[in-house]
Amino acid sequence: CIDSNRFYPTPIMKALGYNHHAVADWLMNNNQLNIQTGESDVLGTTLHVACALCTDTETVTRVARLADSGHLNRVAGDYKYTPVQAALYWGNMSGVLGLLPVLGVDWQVRHEKEGSLLDMARKGGHSIIADWLGFITATVNES
């Protein structure tokens, strides 16, 4: 039995948070799973947990595609981050890359204290992510 707590109140959050990808896949294949339910006091929604902690890019993409559009840019958790901001805060490249193919993610979002996504990556010392975000930002600004 997977217990609940304030970090991972649902089984899918716990599987994602501990990088049990096979369990997460099994849960997502279960037609009874509602990815929109449950919210971690600390991290936010299921998508926030996936973006912050999951090390499998395809799993992050799958969670994002299962989430309704309102969750893609929802501010949640103790840190008041969107899912992409959560990925940056935790330095999770898989979280950032997992969101790239998902339509509707706001790559221009700004945090009231930490600035743009690029600012967050640089301040966090995540130079590889900052390089990617520089490319993404330039591409988005061109379109």
Image (tube, rainbow, N blue to C red):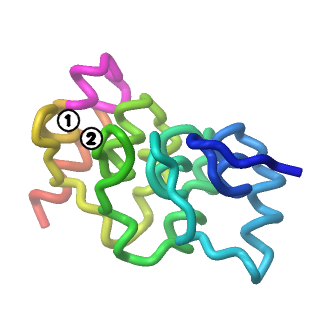
**Boundaries of the magenta span:** 120-130
Residue that label 1 marks: 118
Of 134 and 120, the residue lying toward us: 120
**Residue at x 16% of width, y 32% of height:** 114
Name the image quarter holding residue 134. Answer: top left
Q: Quadrant of the C terminus?
A: bottom left
**Residue at x 14% of width, y 40% of height:** 116
Query: Magenta includes 118?
Result: no
- Amino acid marked by disc 2: Leu
Coordinates of residue 64 in the picture (x, y in percent): 50, 65
Cα–Cα gap, marks 1 and 2:
6 Å
Coordinates of residue 136 in the picture (x, y in percent): 25, 49
Discs 1, 2 touching: Cβ within 8 Å: yes
Residue that label 2 marks: 133
Coordinates of residue 56 in the picture (x, y in percent): 64, 45
- Mark 1 or mark 2: which is in front? 1
